[in-house]
Image (cartoon, grey):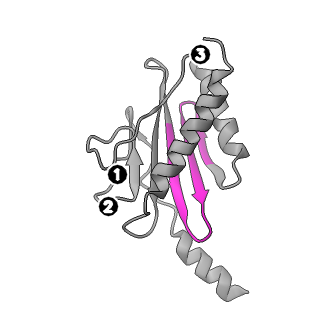
Amino acid sequence: MSIISSILAACAGERPDNLGVQGDRLTGCPGSPNCVSSQAVDEGHRIAPLVFSDDPAPAFARLKQMLVLRGDTTIIEERPRYLRAEFRTTLFVDDGEFLLDAQQRLIHVRSASRLGYSDLGKNRRRMEEIRRQFEAASANIAP
């Protein structure tokens, strides 16, 4: 059993210490294709932010509740405008971040693999799934 635990821990990788918010920006993506960010300027890493029309605080709370209910997600850090989560697949852990921009009524997103070079599009697919869930939850909210 300890061998399996060791293998799984190695696949999870170390929790990065360079994530978080610098001003109004999330950490940039590395050169590898295993990261997406709504603040990236290059097309390979760029993904749209989450958009909402209601008040910022309830929208951000709605996102947090959605993440808490996902079976693959653990909230690691929470601050007034920022959420950091770990997304687990069978063997790997990816790091997700969400930054509220109340003025623009959007939530910036970033998701990156801890290990490897390519994630075969897993981070992009996951963030698009979260976007669909967020939009569906937001559709029931009057602006």
Image location of residue 23, percent across then percent down: 37, 33
Q: Are marks 2 and 3 in contact (CB under 8 Å)?
A: no
Q: Residue at x 36, y 67 (%)?
A: 117
- Closer to the camera, 111 or 75? 111
| In the rendered image, the vertical position of residue 51 relative to residue 120, given as above or below | above
Distance from disc 2 to disc 3, alpha carbons, whole Å, reads 35 Å
Image location of residue 136, percent across then percent down: 64, 30
| In the rendered image, the vertical position of residue 92 relative to residue 134, given as above or below | below
Q: Residue at x 51, y 39 (%)?
A: 98
Q: Which residues are magenta?
A: 76-98
Q: Is residue 58 left or right of residue 93?
A: right
Main secondary structure along the magenta-highlighted residues: strand
Residue 78 part of the magenta-drawn span: yes
Q: Amino acid at mark 1?
A: Cys
Q: Amino acid at mark 2?
A: Ser
Q: Quadrant of residue 118?
A: bottom left
Residue 7 part of the magenta-drawn span: no
Q: Which residue is labeled 3 in the image? A: 54
Q: Quadrant of residue 89?
A: bottom right
Pointer 2 local density, CA inside 10 Å: few below 14, some 14–19, many at least 20: some
Q: Amino acid at mark 3?
A: Asp
Mark number, residue 29: 1
Distance from disc 1 to disc 2, alpha carbons, whole Å, reads 8 Å
